[in-house]
Structure formats: structure tokens, C-alpha cells
Amino acid sequence: MSTSVITTPMNLCALCESIINDDATAVDTNVKKCAVVVNDKLAPGFAVNTAAVLGVTLGKRHSEMVGRDLPDSSGFVHQGITTVAIPVLKADGAFLKNLRSRLKEFEPELLVVDVISATRTTKSYEEYAVVLETSPADEIEYFGLALFGDKKLVAKFTGDLALLR
């Protein structure tokens, strides 16, 4: 874990440069939207883990979703967090499977990330890859989906879903 404190003009200049650069790539939330949909049958710990996995991938694929690092009043710099609201919604497994199928025609303009049930039974990413590659598509059970893209399109697919509570 990195702890940066602004103590020199050089550090301050670097922070100012990162602020300028980060703001130039910010997500226009008037145009883009994000949503995470989690299987409502998952236990709370698994639901949170699924949302976290989806969020990490969203951040990797669209780093502009993450804001600049920010100093507090003492000068300690905190890592940037998302600048985009990410509602975590719920749906049943059948809805998730159907939604995943319907979303394919909108990719790659719409980023769709999925987490499948194999995440609970595999011990490595390589094992997960084998399960994914060898499982018939109609037998895949979805634990969650994340969508990022055109605001109207994301709303079309997720607007009627309830928040996960």
C-alpha cells in the first residue's frame, strides 16, 4: 500500500499534472452509464465478491472511470475511486442468462463482463478458463454481469431491476 505525502514542489507538480491528465479522460455521465447485476440467490458474501470482481474488470477495461488521486487536508494522497455511479442490482439466474444472450449483439460497443459459477469451484484462473472453454453455453450459470456504455442502452437492459440490498 502506497502512502504519498505532498512535501515538495516536485510532488505537487506531479499531482497537478495527473489532475490535468485525468480530467481530460473523465467519463461523460450524460452519455455513458454503468450497472452491475448480481444473481439474487447468492449469499451476501458471494454477491459482494461477484460485484467486486466485476468492478475490478470494469476499472481495468475503462480506467477513465477512476478519478484522480486526491490529497486530504494534511497532504496525504488517497487513491482515486470511481467517478461513475455503479448501481448494484439483482436478478434471478434465468434473467441473467437471458440478458447475457441478448447483450451479445451490442458488443463491443457495450462492454459486458460476466462472472460464472465456476468461480466457486475452480482454484486458479487456468482452471476457470478450462471450465469456461468446455462448458456448453446453455449450461453456464451466471453469478453476475456488468455493463458499461451508452446510457440509454444500459438503462434499457437494467432500468427495471431492483437494487441489491
Image: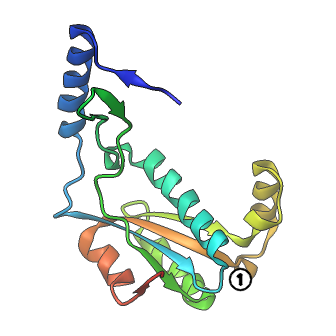
SS type, badge 1: helix
- Is residue 131 shown left or right of residue 71? right
Picture coordinates of residue 138, whole percent (x, y): 71, 82
- Is residue 133 shown left or right of residue 7? right
Q: Nearest the camera: 22 or 73?
A: 73
Q: Residue at x 77, y 57 (%)?
A: 128
Q: Nearest the camera: 157 or 84?
A: 84
- Considering every residue shown, the one lying at the far front of the view is 74
Asked if 110 appears above or below 143 in the picture, the reply is above
Picture coordinates of residue 11, whole percent (x, y): 28, 14
Label 1: how many Cα within 10 Å (few below 14, some 14–19, many 20+): few
Picture coordinates of residue 92, whole percent (x, y): 58, 89
Q: Nearest the camera: 133 or 113?
A: 113
Q: Residue at x 76, y 55 (%)?
A: 129
Q: Residue at x 41, y 87 (%)?
A: 162
State the residue position of label 1.
138
Picture coordinates of residue 165, whole percent (x, y): 48, 82
